[in-house]
Image (cartoon, rainbow, N blue to C red):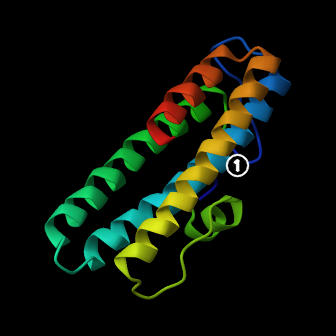
Amino acid sequence: MEPLHSKDTNHGNPVGLPQEVAEKMAKALDRHLSSYIVLYQQYHKHHWLVEGPQFRDLHHFFEINYNAMHEQYDMIAERLTVLGGIPTVHPTAVVDLSYVDHEPEGQYSTRDMLLNELEADKRIAEELRKTCQEAISLGDIGTSYLMQELTFKTG
């Protein structure tokens, strides 16, 4: 079965951005999408594995966060497709594209789980700010607005 569009082919955008701007922003958004997917998986893993006297609160905390990550990466993917891109979703391709590293397999202390997520959240916030500035400089107000909105939610 042949795909309708190649992953590497931008097929235009209905928001009237110059093609080169749309392609550049779509690639940046794809990196964010992959990073959000990695962090989503980590939050979900911690939700399953947390234990101890604060189990209930932390279990709920991780659930709130993986649900928020899912909602936010959906927003990223939708903007990416508006720009004519195709979201990366294959697991190995996501890992390769992500700027957030997958936590190694295994169970960690609650403190280490939280520290790992804090570091990933900080990295995402830093990268969102960079893309926001780039979008502003290229005249992509929609992507800039999305990056600002996600930065307010992340950090």
Whole-percent x and y of residue 142? 61, 18
Whole-percent x and y of residue 145? 58, 20
Q: Is residue 86 visible?
A: no
Based on the displayed image, in which of its 4 quarters is residue 95 positioned?
Answer: bottom right
The correct choice, above or below, for 52 with respect to 31 in the image is below
- Can you identify the residue that label 1 sits on? 7
The residue most toward the right is: 20
The correct choice, above or below, for 103 with respect to 90 in the image is below
Tell which of 155 and 145 is nearer to you: 155
Disc count in the image?
Answer: 1
Based on the displayed image, in which of its 4 quarters is residue 22 positioned?
Answer: top right
The residue located at (39%, 86%) in the rendering is 107
135 to the left or right of 32:
right
Where disc 1 sits, the SS reads loop
For the residue carrying disc 1, how many other residues have a C-alpha within 10 Å: few (<14), some (14-19), or many (20+)?
Answer: few
The residue most toward the top is: 16
Name the amino acid, label 1: Lys
The residue located at (67%, 49%) in the rendering is 31
Tell which of 63 and 119 is nearer to you: 119
Whole-percent x and y of residue 146? 55, 26
The residue located at (67%, 21%) in the rendering is 13
Whole-percent x and y of residue 33? 57, 48
Q: Is residue 79 visible?
A: yes
Based on the displayed image, in which of its 4 quarters is residue 109 positioned?
Answer: bottom left
Tell which of 135 and 20 is nearer to you: 135
Q: Split into 4 quadrants, where in the image is the N terminus?
A: bottom right
123 to the left or right of 130:
left
